[in-house]
Amino acid sequence: MDLGIAGRVALVTAASSGLGRAIAVALAAEGVHVAVTGRSEERLAATVEECAGHGVSALAVAWDLADHGRADEVAGRVAAELGPVDILVNNTGGPPSTPALGQDSGLWEGMYGAMVLPVIRLTDAVVGGMRERGWGRVITSTSSGPIAPIARLGISNTLRASLHSWSKTVANEVAADGVTANVIVPGRIATARTEALDRGRAEREGRTVEEVGHDARAGIPAGRYGRPEEYGAVAAFLASRQAAYVTGSVVRVDGGQIPAV
């Protein structure tokens, strides 16, 4: 299927590895010029190289999302070097594994500044141009926690849930202008983040990582962890011409794992 987005410009945050990289590469494979952000210049270079291998222009912008005041600057650089952003993929790293109760207010504030504010500010920086041009896609990658809270991810569950409500509100505000806003939610995808969570659980419970992984797969109807490229493919579809009537939605890529309807 031709997704009808070749020649568009995408900005994907936190794309030096994992789900962000998978989304960037999936868009590049569709002929989208891609800008990627992340903290590691070395890993960003690898993402850019993989994207450019699909014959598109690719740009790396080193950016720690906690420095959310740079959102306008980053959007401006992408526009100057690749063109105005047509597809924005808001992806952020996750907070430390903790319960919701008893956490220092500084941790809550810091994580809000790294996980929520950059998403809001970057969207504000590019969505005006999308509305003027009559076409745009805002895709926000979160977690299954806002749907079915995950134990010991209290901060993530809480802050990512706020992005679900924000995205739905944005979708309603821009729908008449040809812009869509959707959330994409991963189940257990085989990334370094998932591996770290499995390792942390194994250490807490005095078990091996293999045992933890076996139990986790047993709770997934598909019987396995997802592949990053499967997640990237769904994001690319949400960015497509064909998905123009999909907005304000939360799309799960979880192998059937999330128990809630």
Image (spheres, grey):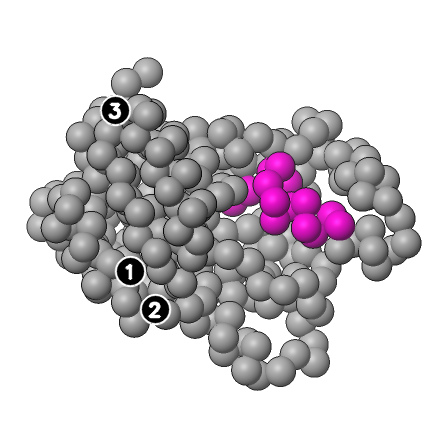
Q: Which mark is residue 68?
A: 2
Q: Are marks 2 and 1 in contact (CB under 8 Å)?
A: yes
Q: What element carries label 1?
A: helix
Q: What residue type is labelled 3?
A: Gly
- The x, y position of residue 4, in whole percent, is 23, 24
- The x, y position of residue 101, in whole percent, is 69, 76
Which residue is situated farthest in the bottom direction here? 105
Q: Is mark 3 on a helix, strand or loop?
A: loop
Residue 193 drawn in magenta:
yes
Q: Quadrant of residue 76?
A: bottom left
Residue 139 shows in this picture: no
Residue 29 drawn in magenta:
no
Local crowd size for mark 2, using a 10 Å CA cut-off: few (<14), some (14–19), many (≥20): many
N-terminal label among 2 and 1: 2
Left or right: 247 in relation to 260: left
Q: Of residues 192 and 243, which is closer to you in this image?
A: 192
Residue at 71% across, 62% down = 152
Q: What residue type is labelled 2?
A: His
Left or right: 169 in relation to 254: left
Q: Which mark is residue 55?
A: 3
- The x, y position of residue 220, in whole percent, is 71, 34
Which residue is situated farthest in the front direction here? 42
How far apart marks 3 and 1 lie (CA) works out to 27 Å
Local crowd size for mark 3, using a 10 Å CA cut-off: few (<14), some (14–19), many (≥20): some
Q: Do the residues labelled 3 and 1 touch (CB within 8 Å)?
A: no
Magenta stretch: give its range.
182-199
Q: Mark 1 points at which residue?
A: 122
